[in-house]
Amino acid sequence: MTTSVIGLSIDAADAAALAAFWSKVLHRPVNPGATTESAAIDAADPAGGPKLAFWRVPEPKSAKNRLHLDLWTDDFEAESKRLTDLGATPVADAEKPAVRWTTFADPEGNEFDLVGPVPAE
């Protein structure tokens, strides 16, 4: 027997609006029929990540995520600017010898990390 992750569900105040943000981030279309109550973005292929489903919940986000997305980029500065232009908010920066990342918050406050290589000196 095999168990696989087929998708991630994300709580939202407005499912369609949050799906639209992530659609732009991931360059993947929102599935037809998105509403304030529910929306989804299918995986284009396994390398594109899992399906994301967005569900309206009555309560606002109140604490740090227990699960978050990590996004990889080869052009850290340009992608950081693009995410900020889309409405993401930088929260914290970190760096290790070969990799760096910024934790961002999406428009509803859900944290995610943008990860990339440390530039050569």
Image (tube, rainbow, N blue to C red):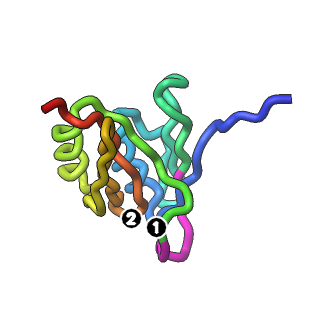
Q: Residue at x 17, y 46 (%)?
A: 81
Q: How many marks?
A: 2
Spatial CA span between label 2 and label 1:
8 Å
User: Would you name the residue on which mark 1 appears?
Assistant: 13
Marks 2 and 1 in Cβ contact (< 8 Å):
yes
**Residue 94 image offset from top left, x and y in percent:** 31, 53
Residue 26 coordinates in the image, percent (x, y)? 37, 37
Residue displayed at 31% across by 40% down = 97
Disc 2 designates what residue?
108
Residue 77 x %, y %: 17, 41
Magenta span contains residue 62 = yes
Q: Tell me which segment is drawn in magenta.
A: 54-63
Q: Is residue 51 above or below residue 93?
A: above
Q: Position of residue 89 (x, y in %)?
A: 26, 60
Q: Quadrant of the C terminus?
A: top left
Q: Amino acid at mark 2?
A: Glu
